[in-house]
Image: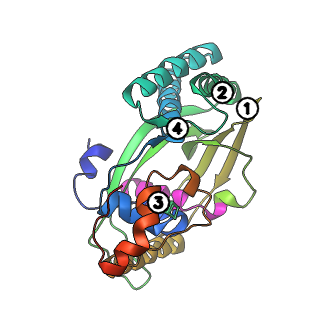
Amino acid sequence: MSTLADYRDRPHWSYSALNQFFNICSLQFAFQRILKLPTAFTPVALGFGSAYHRVMEHIALVRMEGRTPSPADASDLFQSAFERQIEDEPDLKFDDGADAESCARLGRDMCACYVEGIDPEEQVVAISEAFAVPMTDATGFTLETPLIGEIDCVVAKDGKKSLVDWKTSGSRWPKAKASRDWQPTAMLLGYGVQHGETPDFRFDVVVKNKKPVFEQHITTRGPDDFCRLATLARLAESMIAAEHFAPNEQSFYCAGCPYQTACQAWHRETARAWVPVAA
Ligand code: SF4
């Protein structure tokens, strides 16, 4: 069975690329994915997220084998995964007021919180399922570039399946967020093409409060949403061809953006020509 790494070998669209282009910053998209500039640092959120994700995968595997994960084991696992992350990424940049110990403590508590929130009646039926599928818009046009992705986890209860994505968040999610997010659209399109069914999609979110909070947000999508995603990808392709990249300086993401130096020089470089600039 192909993995996400296999699918990444050829040109593709993904939820994260579309989200970065339209919702985060198209200039950051260009720096990272087109010009492939070196990064000045790795935001701690990335290292933290990787360690957290590894723990979630382990918990899901334990559940899939019919065993019951323990909060203490999940905490310990986060500690070692995060320590390894710090070793592997010495350029990890911590947010103001945070350090390795405070992040590790938070991560341990969050993993324990997640395990405590698991429904024992629910079964894990798949983990890390990758897909590469075509995208077709409402006119019937199919993009040459496929959509790829990886579904964190598929669960079932009372004969009903749900796709699950593991998330951490700095604050509680607004009610409408799950219904507007493009990630369920991408994942349900991928799953639907591969399996011929469109189940629910659920975000399992642990909020980074001093005492972490576990939230679940359920949503679904239909054929019209999949056409809309294809139209967005077509639009992105035309904007990329025309080099329509713009800074999103009001963005919440600027503080953690590893391309700040290149961004500051962008308007001067662009005035001459659209060429790579030094980070
Ligand atoms: S610093 Fe902000 S505006 Fe500049 S590239 Fe990064 S996210 Fe975009």
Q: Element under label 1?
A: loop
Q: Give the Cα distance between marks 2 and 1.
A: 8 Å
Q: Amino acid at mark 2?
A: Leu
The verdict on residue 182 being magenta is: yes
Task: Name which of mark 2 and mark 1 comes first in the sequence.
Answer: 2
Q: Amino acid at mark 4?
A: Val
Q: Which mark is residue 44?
A: 4
Question: Closer to the observer: label 4 or label 2?
Answer: 4
Image vertical order of residue 226 relative to residue 62, above or below:
below
Q: Looking at this view, is 276 or 166 the one in front?
A: 276
Q: Main secondary structure of the magenta part?
A: helix
User: Residues in magenta?
Assistant: 179-197
Query: Dot 1 surroundings within 10 Å: few (below 14), some, or many (20 or more)?
Result: many
Q: Are marks 1 and 3 in contact (CB under 8 Å)?
A: no
Residue that badge 2 annotates = 106
Work out whether residue 143 can be spotted.
yes
Describe residue 89's horizontal placement relative to residue 158 as left or right. Answer: left
Question: Closer to the observer: label 3 or label 4?
Answer: 4
Image quadrant where one finds the C terminus: bottom left
Q: Are marks 2 and 1 in contact (CB under 8 Å)?
A: yes
The verdict on residue 81 being magenta is: no
Q: Give the Cα distance between marks 4 and 2.
A: 13 Å
